[in-house]
């Protein structure tokens, strides 16, 4: 569905994205994981026609993101990081104007269906400025689905939301996969990338560090982590299995925590930095 | 017809804002202030071209209101929508042509400008002033709205912050409001400055609204306004096509 080849973006002397090459299959939920400034949003901006690449190329469903924009745009939709709804308009009005831009057939019926799906039907006539953050996020996803896109970009879809609302949104995103929509998701939440993504690309400072399924990435660094807490210092040891973890834990005099490795450990192993501050 | 959707959305937002009293007052505050201070105050002592100053001032304030409201609405909403609310990005990512985006924004700005100038016009007529209305007057108003709405698109797209928009206002809009024949005839200006002022669009709008006869000079003024409008529309389309974050 998406192919990029050495996709790059420079802002003066700053490198936002450096030769990103990847391929995303149809119906896949693909996660871009990395800290702030890793190049995730830049990648989405290029793929959704909001920015020209400085080098390389990208195609979605065979259409070049620079040269085939009129044919590409009806196939894609984006949920941006910022809530860019018109707050003075109602939920229905926001969807209606958006749907008209995409020439959605039977628009009112489609809006009704999606508001039901997003559990917002009872608030259709309310101005968006009176919505909670979680409701606004849900409305953003509903709006993106209005045009029946084949490819959906979700840029940090759950940022700033409380855990309960975040899990509600995860359920919505899983439904998208069930409906056959390809999803490119950016996040800096480890759990989100692991729970939702079929495959994950780890980005750091504009570079692709690793790309595989979450399980395979974690397996590459070892299945378990032994954290040894010594005063204010915590040391990490990645080990392959539980038995090895127990053996290492027993040898420690200080406090020890054994846990399963996750993508954060992969990130630390690859970059020497923590993903979340 | 996607331009009409963009226009319609702006009109709905405009309607919602109109319902706020403070918004209407702040929009019309400057022209009403000029009308009161210069027209009603100074106007009794000043005679221009054998007529009352208020009769001279009224078409100028109508043109100025149209200019400031068309320009400010478009430049601010585009700038804020692009940099802060990021609602403008919806148009850029949707299957909408650059021409449709510009057309929708310009049409909305024109309506906004016409609305503001209509209020000044009605107020002036209520004060017993006389003005000549005909096709040329209507075309002058429309062309003025086109020029300054389209200029608003250009400024809204190119300014890198809200302060940038204010800079454009201070360097282009404000001098035009004072020197292009709104408050005194352009002929009163020194020769060199007069030539420069005659190249600016508001001067031509003022001439069209004050003497809206169908003659060669007015047709040239109308063509100049259309030329400015077209130039800004083309620039707006180019800037949108080249837009990259």
Image (cartoon, rainbow, N blue to C red):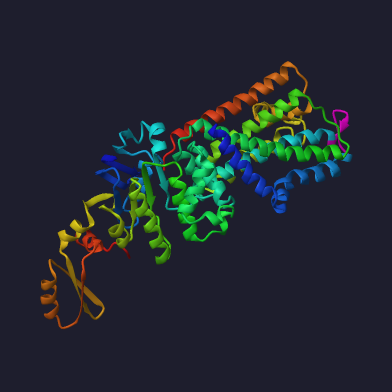
Q: Which residues are magenta?
A: B45-54
Displayed quadrant of residue A174: bottom left
User: What residue appears at the point 80 percent right and 27 percent down from the top-left corner?
Assistant: B133
Would residue A122 be visible to someone looking at this image?
A: yes
Q: Quadrant of the N terminus of chain A?
A: top left
From the viewer's perspective, tell me whether residue B188 is left or right of residue B17.
Answer: right
- Of A218 and B147, nearer the camera is A218
From the viewer's perspective, tell me whether residue B22 is left or right of residue A129.
Answer: right
- Give the farthest residue toward the top: B216
Residue B147 part of the magenta segment: no
Would residue B193 be visible to someone looking at this image?
A: no
Residue B168, position as x, y percentages in the image: 58, 41
- Of B55 and B172, nearer the camera is B55
Displayed quadrant of residue B171: top right
Residue B88, position as x, y percentages in the image: 50, 43
Q: Is residue A145 above or below residue B242?
A: below
Q: Quadrant of the C terminus of chain A?
A: bottom left
From the viewer's perspective, tell me whether residue B129 is left or right of residue A138.
Answer: right
Displayed quadrant of residue A26: top left
Q: Is residue B201 above or below residue A104?
A: above
Q: Is residue A161 above or below residue A174?
A: below
User: What residue appears at the point 52 percent right and 54 percent down from the top-left corner?
Assistant: A121
User: What residue appears at the point 68 percent right and 29 percent down from the top-left corner?
Assistant: B142
Residue A104, position as x, y percentages in the image: 48, 38
User: What residue appears at the point 75 percent right and 43 percent down from the top-left corner?
Assistant: B31
Q: How many dots with numbers?
A: 0
Residue B75, position as x, y percentages in the image: 58, 41
């Amino acid at each position: 569905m998406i192919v990029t080849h050495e996709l790059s973006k420079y802002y003066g002397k700053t490198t936002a994205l450096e030769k990103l090459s990847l391929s995303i299959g149809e119906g896949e939920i693909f996660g871009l994981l990395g800290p702030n400034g890793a190049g995730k949003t830049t990648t989405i901006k290029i793929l959704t026609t909001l920015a020209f690449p400085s080098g390389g190329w990208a195609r979605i469903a065979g259409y070049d993101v620079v040269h085939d924009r009129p044919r590409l745009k009806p196939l894609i939709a984006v949920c941006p990081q910022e809530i860019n709804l018109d707050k003075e308009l109602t939920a229905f009005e926001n969807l209606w104007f958006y749907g008209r831009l995409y020439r959605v057939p039977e628009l009112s019926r489609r809006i009704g269906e999606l508001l039901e799906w997003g559990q917002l039907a009872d608030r259709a006539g309310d101005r968006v400025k009176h919505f909670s953050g979680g409701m606004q996020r849900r409305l953003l996803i509903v709006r993106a689905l209005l045009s029946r896109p084949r490819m959906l970009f979700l840029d940090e879809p759950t940022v700033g939301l409380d855990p309960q609302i975040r899990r509600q949104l995860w359920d919505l995103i899983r439904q998208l996969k069930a409906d056959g929509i390809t999803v490119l998701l950016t996040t800096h939440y480890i759990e989100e990338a692991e729970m939702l993504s079929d495959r994950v690309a780890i980005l750091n400072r504009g570079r692709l560090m690793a790309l595989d399924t979450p399980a395979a990435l974690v397996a590459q660094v070892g299945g378990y982590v032994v954290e040894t807490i010594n005063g204010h210092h915590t040391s990490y040891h990645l080990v392959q299995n539980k038995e090895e973890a127990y053996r290492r834990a027993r040898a420690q005099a200080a406090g020890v925590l054994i846990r399963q490795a996750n993508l954060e450990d992969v990130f630390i192993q690859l970059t020497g930095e923590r993903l979340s501050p | 017809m996607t331009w009409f959707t963009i226009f319609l959305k702006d009109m709905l937002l405009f309607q919602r804002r109109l319902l706020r009293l403070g918004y209407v007052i702040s929009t019309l505050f400057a022209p009403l202030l000029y009308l009161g201070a210069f027209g009603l105050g100074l106007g009794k002592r000043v005679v221009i071209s054998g007529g009352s100053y208020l009769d001279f001032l009224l078409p100028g304030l109508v043109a100025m209101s149209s200019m400031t409201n068309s320009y400010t609405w478009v430049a601010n909403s585009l700038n804020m929508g692009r940099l802060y609310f990021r609602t403008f990005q919806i148009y850029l990512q949707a299957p909408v042509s650059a021409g449709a985006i510009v057309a929708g924004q310009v049409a909305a700005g024109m309506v906004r400008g016409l609305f503001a100038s209509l209020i000044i016009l009605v107020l002036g007529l209520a004060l017993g002033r006389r003005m000549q209305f005909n096709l040329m007057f209507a075309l002058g108003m429309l062309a003025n709205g086109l020029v300054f709405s389209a200029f608003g698109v250009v400024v809204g797209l190119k300014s890198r912050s809200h302060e940038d928009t204010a800079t454009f206002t201070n360097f282009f809009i404000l001098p035009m409001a004072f020197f292009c024949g709104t408050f005194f005839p352009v002929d009163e200006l020194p020769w060199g400055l007069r030539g420069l002022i005659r190249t600016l669009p508001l001067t031509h709008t003022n001439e069209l609204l004050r003497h809206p006869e169908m003659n060669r000079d007015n047709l040239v003024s109308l063509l100049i306004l259309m030329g400015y409008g077209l130039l800004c529309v083309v620039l707006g389309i180019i800037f949108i096509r080249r837009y990259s974050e």
